[in-house]
């Protein structure tokens, strides 16, 4: 919702005028400096990079200061640095934001409540913690081990509470039935030189694929 054949400043001035924002000159200067596009305000938007256009759109949001935002793929086509910048600014707004995105990493960083949509219908809705508790019944762990890895793998494969084992370069990734089995697991691990134990949560992408 920005116009490419006029300057960035003209865009922001137009939206300020439409929304009857007072003292728009100082506000544009302040917001543009905060977002980091003050040097580009007098350039035509058609010369902007994709990231610059996204930052200009973010400037418009900050100037208009709506109570609720509806954002459709706000980080599409952006590099990692610009994406993280947009996420940080949106988080700092402390507003209600409705976001649609195929980028699960953005969803994970920005959203406190998630709705998975398939073929136009919401198939699951909840916080990240609620969705994980529904879909992740067991516990996934990474075990760092340098010596006797094959021996440990063979022993774990014989345990009923171990449901899956993946051989990694520097250790094993295993899945156990639940946290009640930690005592059994640790009694086995105590006989080996374990360098790392890390519990692995399902990512938002993993949750989506499991739900589908």
Image (cartoon, rainbow, N blue to C red):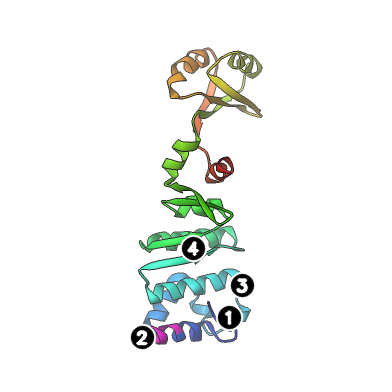
Residue under the point 50% across and 86% down: 10
State the quadrant of the C terminus.
Answer: top right
| Image coordinates for residue 60, horizontal then vertical, percent | 45, 76
Residue under the point 40% across and 87% down: 17
Query: Residue 49 bears which disc, if any?
Result: 3
Q: Earlier in the sequence, mark 2 or mark 3?
A: 2
**Numbered disc 2: secondary structure:** loop
Q: CA distance from mark 2 to mark 1?
A: 23 Å
Query: Residue 86 bears which disc, if any?
Result: 4
Compared to residue 14, the image places residue 114 above or below, namely above
Compared to residue 123, the image places residue 23 above or below, namely below
Residue ID for mark 2: 20
| Residue extent of the magenta highlight | 15-21
Which of labels 2 and 4 is toward the front?
2
| Image coordinates for residue 12, horizontal then vertical, percent | 46, 82
Q: Mark 2 and 3 residues: CB-CB less than 8 Å, in contact? A: no
Query: Residue 165 bears which disc, if any?
Result: none
Q: Earlier in the sequence, mark 2 or mark 1?
A: 2
Q: CA distance from mark 1 to mark 4?
A: 19 Å
Q: CA distance from mark 2 to mark 4?
A: 26 Å
**Numbered disc 4: secondary structure:** helix
Disc 2 residue crowd, few under 14, some 14–19, many 20+, Cα 10 Å: few
Residue ID for mark 1: 45
């Amino acid at each position: 919702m920005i116009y490419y054949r006029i300057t960035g400043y003209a865009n922001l001035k137009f939206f300020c005028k439409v929304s009857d924002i007072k003292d728009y000159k100082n506000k544009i200067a302040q917001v543009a400096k905060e977002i980091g596009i003050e040097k580009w305000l007098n350039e035509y938007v058609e010369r902007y990079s994709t990231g610059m256009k996204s930052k200009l759109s973010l400037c418009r949001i900050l100037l208009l200061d709506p109570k609720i935002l509806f954002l459709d793929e706000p980080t599409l086509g952006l590099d990692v640095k610009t994406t993280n910048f947009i996420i940080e600014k949106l988080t700092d707004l402390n507003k209600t934001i409705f976001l649609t995105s195929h980028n699960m990493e953005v969803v994970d960083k920005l959203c406190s409540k998630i709705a998975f949509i398939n073929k136009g219908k919401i198939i699951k809705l909840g916080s990240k913690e609620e969705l994980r508790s529904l879909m992740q019944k067991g516990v996934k762990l990474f075990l760092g081990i340098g010596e006797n890895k094959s021996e440990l793998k063979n022993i774990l494969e014989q345990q009923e509470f171990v449901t899956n084992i993946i051989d990694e370069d520097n250790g094993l990734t295993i899945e156990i039935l639940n946290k009640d089995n930690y005592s059994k697991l640790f009694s086995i691990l105590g006989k080996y030189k374990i360098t790392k134990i890390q519990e692995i949560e399902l990512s938002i992408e993993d949750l989506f694929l499991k739900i589908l």
